[in-house]
Image (cartoon, grey):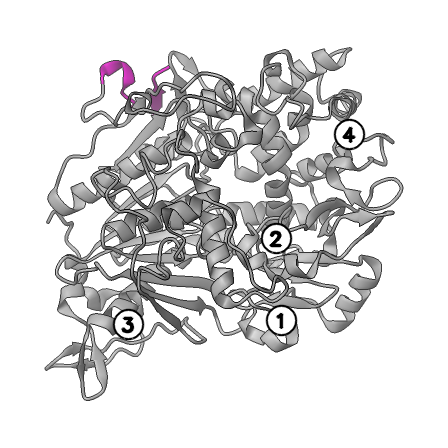
Amino acid sequence: MSRHPRALLAALPFAIAACSHDPNFGDENVRPDYIKGAIVSATYDGTSNDLLTAGLGKSGLAGAAPAVATPAAPTVAELRTLAIYNNYRALVDMTAAGGYGVLYGPNIDVNGNSSLGEGKVAGEEHIAYADDGTGAQNVTMMVQIPASFSPESPCIVSAVSSGSRGVYGAIATAGEWGLKHGCAVAYSDKGTGNGGHDLAANTVDNMQGTRMSAAAAGKDSEFTANLSSTDLAAFNAAFPNRWAYKQAHSQQNPEATWGRDNLRAIEFAFYMLNQKYGETHGGTIYKSDKLALDKTIVIASSVSNGAGAALAAAEQDTQGLIDGVAVGEPQVQVNLPASVVVKRGGNAVTGGGKSLYEYFAIANLYEPCAALADASATAVGLTPILLVNKAAAANRCAALAANGLVTGATPQEQANAALAKMLGSGWEAESIAFMPTHYLFAVLPVEVTYANAYAKASVKDNLCGYSFGGTPAGGVPAAIPAAAAAQLFGTGNGVPPTGGINILNNNSVGGVAVDAASVSPSTGKADYNYDGAKCLYDLFTAQNATGTALRAGIDASKRSANLRGKPVILVQGRSDTLVPVNHASRAYYALNKSVESGSKLVYYEVTNAQHFDSFVGTAAFAGYDTRLIPLHRYFLQAMDIMYANLKNGAAIPASQVVRTTPRGGTPGAAPAITPSNVPPIAATPAAADAITFSGSTLSIPD
């Protein structure tokens, strides 16, 4: 086994807290002090129910949503099944033509063959909260120990949720890979989670998703807004039927502590493994020597926000807990020095290295107008099904022009200028085709959520006039159906719009309206809420308390890019429209090479791949299927490469551009994917594909 030197299990951070030592047996297995409540455990037989598919199997995950016997009162088991079903489908293309059940999926074994039948995985599942005792953090952690786990060859994979999803939010990515390889999987919702507080009903979810009153839940609530009874009553009177959401309104800025939460999840996995495999003497459980750090492979992994959390954990890992990292499409922020140059081909990239908040503010402001640009004429989402409202988009262009933010006398000229702004702010041209769909379904939810999170705003602040609530009727939001509220743990994604909860414009002319249909006071027009978008854009530089707090929150969430000598693999799609490569992987890679002597970081940039594999197989998004391949294919390869390196010392291929071939054909009916569409990462990249860093210049082949 190829391992870097490090201490034994006794060096774990939690081991230093009240850990007794018996010279005959070693160290006692002490429960980490940040686990404040009960540890809820269950065992699944791998037939009627299981760790990976909740008993649905490969076929069930691809089928219709599982039924709930009493929709307004789902059981804990039903909520878990819904959560696994929806989180799995949110991360991968679920069509066979796109690769499900062929290149990846529960039925595909570690050698890439379809040999696992329905792919159910027997084993144990343990869930607990990590908290400081106040109940304000309540980071959900979960450890899955497959029946195939071997203490003779132990491994742990961390699987932090992507986006703002709940604790099952990485089950289709790092979770599946780890379980198939017999590894314990350390999950965490990293303090974002799927916690919604219905302020009018004053109901919340507990750790396993059961809906109850905030008073009954107490400190066991996944999230309860920090409002006094007086403030809650006043807010409900002024803003009826609103919701607070955990990442947006916890006032914790959870991104700043994603690394800590990931490390804690790994520690929790070691604790539960030692509870199972440690030696018991006199009623006391002692740690197993077989689970010592120098004998256990630990890979930090996940995608998107979860990938950013894995990188943060590696940077903060002073105890040598993590051996290696393999992540996909990381949402990670750095301060990239002006002296560092990123080139694509022979051309210097402009506008890269921005914070997530800044580039989302730009997208939220300019993307609706850019949808009318000449280069957007064939973009996915400009179809009768997902038609960008051209009148509203033209109105956004007019508002931008009236305020000097774009030039041009016609909507077309203004749209071309808006698109030029996007391209000059770090987006690659490969993203143009996917901007309209991303705006319609992803940009505003992220921007509103992070504005509140970074500023540590309260729900009662209604930052920039935005709030979350049911669909308004006559300018007044309605309560969402009881069944929808009861099932949110299983159906929600942690960021409205979700489960019937919308993003609302409180300031819309004529009364509260769903944001996309609202009318801006400054223009008197339906323009995708120009006033709100401009307000969010201006917060980044606002010289007031909110702007200052927001910038402090952003700075607290930036990473150093010093990976402490660990081998690390980044994988990202060049067409990533949500988290552009110039702000994420390219910027992180360049900074790492600038600050870490002896860096072991490699980067694989995949052509014809983007952030949302699930969009590729979505029928309404016809055109994604003909133009894109699943990035998930390369995430899995990166995990295989890292595991082989840590276990057997196999070489990690050098940084490179991986050139793929889209499936082509008719939008919505692309031919089935074949291995030729997704060639493997080259053991030795051709010179024309090699990504290099020299001096202070990162060079990405065209």
Tell me: residue 448, above or below residue 137: above
**Where in the figure is residue 301, as x and y percent of width and height?**
34, 47
Q: Specify few, some or many for label 3: CA neighbours under 10 Å numbering under 14, 14-19, or 20 or more.
A: few
In front: label 4 or label 2 = 4
Q: Specify few, some or many for label 1: CA neighbours under 10 Å numbering under 14, 14-19, or 20 or more.
A: some
The residue closer to the viewer here, 455 or 301, is 301
Q: Which residues are magenta?
A: 686-702
Dot placed on the residue nearer the N-terminal end, 4 or 2: 2
**Where in the figure is residue 484, as x and y percent of width and height?**
64, 56
The numbered dot on residue 516 is none
The residue closer to the viewer here, 609 or 30, is 609
Mark 3 lies on residue: 16
Mark 1 lies on residue: 212
Mark 4 lies on residue: 527
Residue sitting farthest toward the bottom: 282
Dot placed on the residue nearer the N-terminal end, 3 or 2: 3
Mark 2 lies on residue: 248
